[in-house]
Amino acid sequence: MSSSRSVLQHTPRDGVRTFTPRWRTSPLTAERMERLLPRHAIPDEGVLDPQAWFGRTAPVVLEIGSGHGAAAVAYAAGHPDHDLVAVEVHVPGVARMLAAAEPLGLTNLWVERGDAVPLLTSRVPSGSLAAVHLFFPDPWPKAKHAKRRFVQQHTLTLLADRLAPGGVLRIATDHAVYAEHVREQVTAHGGWDMVEGARPEWRPQDGFEAKGLAAGRTVAEFSLTPR
């Protein structure tokens, strides 16, 4: 059996993560988290309720793996009529995002520090998201680690259910292996329409994207809508 075929048949297992939780927390990071996170954190419990969580009923966008938050901050600043929930496990990245958002006075940027899959599975209802953003996820380039890539058959099914009618899944990667992985997974799934090449104008060239371009890699952009 080929490694490609085995990935398509992959069944999620406890302990197989799409991220590696390794970082050090500096005094500056700790100060930012203590001071700024309470203003932006979503509730610890309960199912997504825009009116209760955000104080209004507006389109909700989920960003998976926001990194240092440049894209999340830019989206929130450029779309004040939307609420964006940035999900990120990396504490220094969350702290940096919150610091960038502070001078802008953003009131529509929300944070979940943790894994996106449990959040999507247990707390996000069907048809409740206007969009999902997955920008420059960990590529896990080795074939033996392919099961750790976020885009899999089960996550595509989960996201298709959580998106509202007309909702969109946006994916960007600067790794050719991951781009081909996305094409293969989406084609095999059969529940999505996929367009390549449409880069969102609002997203800054920052972080992993800037590093990828500097290294001479090409950024692949995907826009997916459930059928």
Image (cartoon, grey):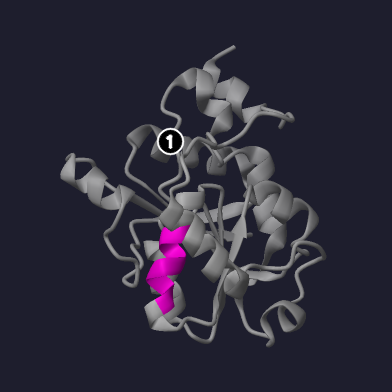
Farthest residue to the right: give it: 46
Is residue 223 among the parts visible in the rendering? no
User: In terms of secondary structure, what is the magenta stretch mainly?
Assistant: helix
Question: Could you say which is closer to the camera, residue 79 or residue 223?
Answer: 79
Residue identifier under label 1: 139
Q: From which residue to which does the magenta span run?
A: 95-102
Q: Amino acid at mark 1?
A: Pro
* In the image, residue 58 above or below residue 23: below
Residue 135 can be seen in this image: yes
- Where 214 sits versus 66, above or below? above
Residue at 71% across, 70% down = 128
Residue at 38% x, 32% y is 177
Residue 148 pos. (x, y %)? 56, 31
Q: In the rendered image, which quarter contains the N terminus?
A: top right
Q: Nearer the viewer, residue 71 or 59?
A: 71
Q: Residues within 10 Å of mark 1 (few under 14, many from 20)?
A: many
Left/right placement of residue 190 relative to residue 12 reads: left
| Residue 44, above or below 143 | below
Image quadrant containing the C terminus: bottom right
* 3 part of magenta stretch: no
